[in-house]
Image (tube, rainbow, N blue to C red):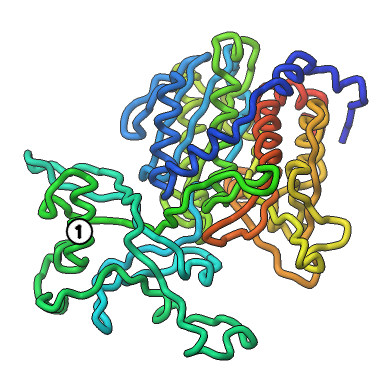
Amino acid sequence: MLLKFDSTDLNFCTLQVSACEESPSVVSELLDFLNESWTQFHATAEAKRQLLAAGFHLLDENDEWEIKPGGRYFFTRNMSCLVAFAVGEKYSLGSGFHVIAAHTDSPCLKLKPVSALSKAGYDMVNVQTYGGGLWHTWFDRDLSVAGRAILRADDGSFVHKLVKVKRPILRVPTLAIHLDRTVNTDGFKPNLETHLLPLLATKPEDETPLKHEGKCSFPSPKNVHHPVLLQILSEEMGCTVDQIMEIELNLCDTQPSCLGGAHNEFIYSGRLDNLASSFCALRALIDSCNSLESLLNEPSIRMVALFDNEEVGSGSVQGAGAPTMFQGMRRIIDCLGHDYVGEGTFERAVRQSFLVSADMAHGVHPNFTEKHEDQHRPLLQKGMVIKHNANQRYATNALTAFLFKQVARAHNLPTQEFVVRNDMGCGSTIGPILATGVGMRTVDCGIPQLSMHSVREICGKEDVDIAYKIFVAFYRTFSTLDKKLNVDGR
């Protein structure tokens, strides 16, 4: 292994440092993104809108692609997974991909296929838990629904449409203290099957109970969901109830994302894990190639990949466990090769590639400082957190951490380190999955936050801008930086 790097090399990106440090705050745009992106489908749709507005070309995975150096492109899968990329003007076959990957999903409650339920004079909604949420935080919140529907058009075709009901229509009430006297001493331990059912409405006296068994060989939404809920959805989408063929809905907190704290230094929001990372990555890609000149001297391909289903293990066609990104990379290389791809072109490109796996990190909790290892306590407002785990729950190693920190140091941007205590379990993310899938150098990092997996989370405003600036710097300067590190004969 040969390492050739000294402090003078920090001058390699002087122009980019100035541009990065002078960039305006992206916090207000993040708040807009969060308030728009109630579900993974809405997050992907909003990312699609921003990419189209920035001049990226939408590709269809079912069509043949035409990719050219200097071009900017993207495609979606399931409208909950997205891959976008920009090809450097100086790209040559075998050059690498510089990728930032994140995920669009968050822990939430989802409607069951048969959601209509009535108990004790109430119409209620049957839900299932998605991911490892802090489910007690969903009680006594003003909730609604959002997601997607399949509609039947007048010509007999079917239309995929997103829906969001912005007003609160659901609530999971807690039991009064008078009926649960020991809750404050023994803890709140709800049964997730029986106690987490939201109230939708008072049950009309003349409402006929829904019966599902044996009623119809081909059940429609009218048979399995409350009529009042379907009516609300149809009004929101501008269609009739009869046109609704299928729905996939998340429960969502209606309280808007906002700034908080005495100095407005915090962001209060649901779904920070991991929409904050998704937004910063997306915005960094768009801003790093927002002019023809920005790709003029770039020999590599800049890419962002946003996946669904990370919170449940990534094992889906739209998750990081699927070959979506790698299939896209191979197709890009095939297109740029103009029908000629030499021996090992894809493999050589992978070896020159680098992945930043961006997922939110655990900031130290002031009331539970003992939960963190003494020397690894990330603080809010102190920069990006690099995640390490000797048992490979994170994909970071010394070399990938070094390169990522070198990008940050060159731009005077702070980073922190995180290692979980030896007597505690360690979470994971998409980094090890993607690194294993194709053998790409990977660093796991994230914005520090509190209340992770709560219905309402918190992170630092400054950390969002730091993450965005590091991501922009990564796209603009990594090709130059990577040439200065020689490992395995690279």
Image spot of residue 33 (x, y percent): 48, 38
Tell me what residue is drawn at x 88 percent, y 32 percent: 2
Tell me what residue is drawn at x 14 percent, y 63 percent: 222
Q: Residue furthest left?
A: 155
Quarter-of-image position of residue 440: top right
Neighbours of disc 1 within 10 Å: few (<14), some (14-19), many (20+): some
Tell me what residue is drawn at x 32 percent, y 29 percent: 63
* Nearer to us in this view, 381 or 140: 140
If the image is split into quadrants, where does the C terminus sit? Answer: top right
Relative to 185, 83 lies left or right = left
Classify 490 as above or below 322.
above
Relative to 85, 294 lies left or right = right
Classify 124 as above or below 293.
below
Classify 481 as above or below 119.
above
* Nearer to us in this view, 476 or 434: 476
Residue 88 can be seen in this image: yes
* Nearer to us in this view, 122 or 65: 122
Image spot of residue 268 (x, y percent): 58, 50
Question: Callout 1: helix, strand or loop?
Answer: helix
Image spot of residue 275 (x, y percent): 53, 45
Tell me what residue is drawn at x 48 percent, y 37 percent: 32
Image spot of residue 34 (x, y percent): 49, 43
The total of numbered circles placed on residues is: 1
* Nearer to us in this view, 332 or 276: 276
Q: Which residue is mark 1?
A: 230
Relative to 368, 9 lies left or right = right
Q: Amino acid at mark 1?
A: Leu
If the image is split into quadrants, where does the N terminus sit? Answer: top right
Residue 444 can be seen in this image: no
Classify 351 as above or below 158.
above
